[in-house]
Amino acid sequence: MSTKGFQRTLEMEKVEGGDSKAAPESVKYHGWKSMPYVIGNETFEKLGTLGTLANLLVYLTSVFHIKSITAVTMVNIFHGTTNMAPVLGAFISDTYLGRYATIGFASLASLLGMMLLTLTAAIPALHPPPCKGSQQECKGPTLSQLSVLISAFFLFTIGAGGIRPCNLAFGADQFNPNTESGRKDIASFFNWYYCTFTVAMMISSTFIIYVQSNISWTLGLAIPAVLMLFSCIAFFIGTKLYVRVKPEGSPFTSFAQVVVAAFKKRRVNLPELPEKELFDPPLNSSLVTKLPHTDQFKVLDKAAAITSKDEIKSNSEGADPWRLCTLQQVEEVKCFVRIIPVWTCGVMFFITLSQQQSYVVYQALQMDRRLRKSSFEIPAGSFVVFNMLALTLWIPIYDRLIVPQLRKITKCPGGITMLQRIGIGLVISIVGTVVSAIVEKHRRDIALHKPTVGNTSTGEAVSSMSSLWLLPQLILFGLSEGFAIIGQNEFYYQQFPENMRSIAGAMLFLGMAISSYASGILVTIVHKVTGRNGRKNWLAQDLNEARLDLFYMIIAGAAVLNFVYFIVCAKWYRVKGTANGAKPMVVSERKEEKSLSV
């Protein structure tokens, strides 16, 4: 996009409380001055929600006495729903409320949910009585107790639906995208945003879980509730500093109009000079950037083709928007369609990540977790912290040391392009999966052919191989997240039409939701196929009898195919704002345009 294009964006910026056609001078970006409130809100919110939900399965089984299979089903449904809810929340934000109001409302909903869940632990009448007798006879929850619990889950879902898709885009809104320094700050913000997210996960996975499991459930749930209160306070204190972009109506209505109009005119021939002959009136939007015509998905251009049946009003609008659409509408649909193939590559990445996070705990359980033969054992569930620690340490190094050097070489604001960053993350995840397979094969061989060091609580033999051998794969996956996930977040934010940036924030969580369901299906298929005819399946409970290493290699093979598919998609992808005649993936930096070349 050229300097002129960026200037047009700023001129069309709409800020709450200001003129809808505000001049550039009236939009005051506070940038990093507003970040203590934005990132403070995000950090406390993540500490609160993750601290509450990280140990949820244990809470359901130990306090509410819900059977494990039922509890697992409830948690899976809950996590799937909270990852799907951001799609609806993003639609409401971009269409009706705006990001500021959506985050504010959702933060209060999360706070109420945490307070309600804390009350279920604090008030005896809101949870079943403790188990009694030597046989540990446990009474399950009553309908009223279950109703209160589900109500807390419902409020959590509302909070997740509003906060997750909006807070990243809202933070990026605080920087001026029309200056070189502003664009660099946006790229840096994405790095630090994910860094604080990871730190919050580390604290939740250690300190808060320890309080819940070893001190008191009431205190362990009250701490996240208080942190969520701090999140709300931090967010609202910064109100006067925020740039608040108002929504301009449903983008999906415009998308539907383009599809319907193109179908109605499917037999119409396209003009020879589409840039000049398609319906392209002046853009009246105060938010969206004017997009040039592109020659991809030409069938959609028919929606903007003017025929004898079309009527144009005096204000340069089509009389029937379901028959004649503007070229701008058509190009916005094309932007969305181009992103989908890249997004599907991210889904496979999350499947790879999900399998690693699930089975590394089981690997740790059947490895020697003692430190230097001492009596202290690293909890199996805490190994995920090494993944987070690698990511937390890497992001500052990458952002402050590596990116400035890369900028000198590539002249790209982010050091490398967003698609390059995603691609590097995919490659590292493949290497990490192969390393996981090698480590697991070695662990299994030692367990089968050398003396073991004991048994797990369920009777499986523990290999004498040190669990610290899991660190290389965990570090690699931490680095892959630092490239692929942050790259995806920034890519969606930059490449979606401006009136869909909250929806762009929901795309990552939608990919996570789909990968969760896909991972479950994959595990079920492998479990059934490899366990036929009485054979031990590859995912047996005892990893010494299973072949988890082969399962990892299957995942790695699928990840390689996904990377090849990603390369094809990246080469084909045309950057938003790139006109015809330019290379699809190269935009000149000398003209102060964004480069996403791969």
Image (cartoon, rainbow, N blue to C red):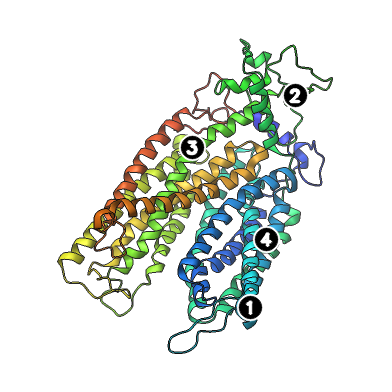
Q: Residue lying furthest right in this view?
A: 314
Q: Which residue is painted at 58% across and 36% down in the image?
A: 495
Residue that carries the numbered disc 4 in the rendered image: 107
x, y percent for residue 279: 71, 19
Badge 1: few (under 14), some or many (20 or more) residues near its Cα, within 10 Å? many
Quadrant housing the C terminus: top left
Q: Residue lying furthest left in this view?
A: 449
Q: Nearer the viewer, residue 310 or 14?
A: 310
Above-or-below relation of 110 to 180 = below
Q: Nearer the viewer, mark 1 or mark 2?
A: 1
Above-or-below relation of 422 to 567 = below
Q: Earlier in the sequence, mark 3 or mark 1?
A: 1
Q: Earlier in the sequence, mark 3 or mark 2?
A: 2
Which amino acid is tagged 4? Ser
The label number, if any, that marks residue 282 in the structure image: 2
Q: Nearer the viewer, residue 79 or 493?
A: 79
Q: Nearer the viewer, mark 3 or mark 2?
A: 3
The label number, if any, that marks residue 342 in the structure image: 3
Which amino acid is tagged 2? Pro
Residue that carries the numbered disc 1 in the rendered image: 126
Badge 4: few (under 14), some or many (20 or more) residues near its Cα, within 10 Å? many
